Amino acid sequence: SQKIEQNSEALNIQEGKTATLTCNYTNYSPAYLQWYRQDPGRGPVFLLLIRENEKEKRKERLKVTFDTTLKQSLFHITASQPADSATYLCALEATGYSTLTFGKGTMLLVSP
Amino acid sequence: ETGVTQTPRHLVMGMTNKKSLKCEQHLGHNAMYWYKQSAKKPLELMFVYSLEERVENNSVPSRFSPECPNSSHLFLHLHTLQPEDSALYLCASSQEKPSGTSGGSQETQYFGPGTRLLVL
């Protein structure tokens, strides 16, 4: 069966360091992968989308990589700030389907 | 604000009540979604209205009933819910491309703030 795995344990890092979050998937052939941010009691907010033929995408302090051989995406936040503390979700749309499947998300805590 | 509004933001209901959740999107999108989010679980897609076609998750109990009167409004009608239905209910919208369009059929989803539902 199709599965998306994100580290369920919270990631604690110090302000200024680079945070790296992982999204692994099995039994998917994704057309693209998306990353969302969710704050407590709020809906997810879209951050970045990376397509299957792209290796890397950047937006300000954010960087996403996509390795379809390893079936993995890495999400990096450089120069992290306490305001980056949130839960980060990855989502996949499999090729030929029209809905997104979300991972459970990883909570990031950036301490001053 | 994401352009997607949901009301009410909080709802407490008994198991015999009937209530409705409302969602409105101001983005001109042609697809709308209901998701359920429970603690420690991934977002669970409940219903999709896409290009005027309804797609259901067959595991959703019949006590949840969606209604989409037009492309901007979406309702979730609730009746005889159970305590395990307590969760955050999220509405989302997106602009879906017809199947066969290059670049994938669906892109970013825009979420509302959610309705926190407690069933007693």
Image: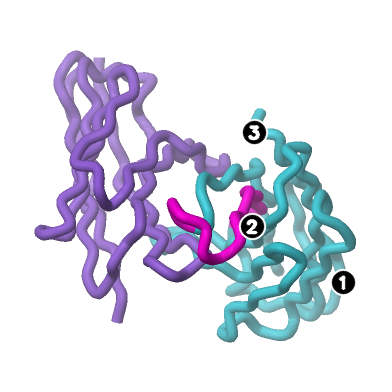
Chain colours: A purple, B cyan
Looking at the rendered structure, the secondary structure element under dot 2 is strand
Q: Is residue B84 magenta?
A: no
Check disc 3: other Cα within 10 Å, few if <14, some if 14-19, many if 20+: some
Residue at 21% x, 53% y is A7
Horizontal side, residue A14 vs residue B96: left or right: left
Q: Where is mark 3, residue-wise?
A: B2
Looking at the rendered structure, the secondary structure element under dot 1 is strand
**Nearer the observer, disc 2 or disc 1?**
2
Mark earlier in primary sequence (3, 2): 3
Residue at 17% x, 21% y is A14
Q: Position of residue B88 (x, y in %)?
A: 60, 55
The alpha-carbon separation of the residues under discs 2 and 1 comes to 16 Å
Q: Position of residue A2 (x, y in %)?
A: 31, 75
In this view, B79 is above or below A25: below
Mark earlier in primary sequence (2, 1): 1
The alpha-carbon separation of the residues under discs 3 and 1 comes to 28 Å
> What stretch of residues is rendered in magenta?
B88-104
Q: What's the chain of the residue with tag 2? A: B
Residue at 21% x, 21% y is A78
Q: What's the chain of the residue with tag 3? A: B
Q: Where is mark 1, residue-wise?
A: B18
In this view, B93 is above or below A42: below
Q: Visible in this render: residue B99?
A: yes
Amino acid at circle 1: Lys
Q: Position of residue B24 (x, y in %)?
A: 80, 46
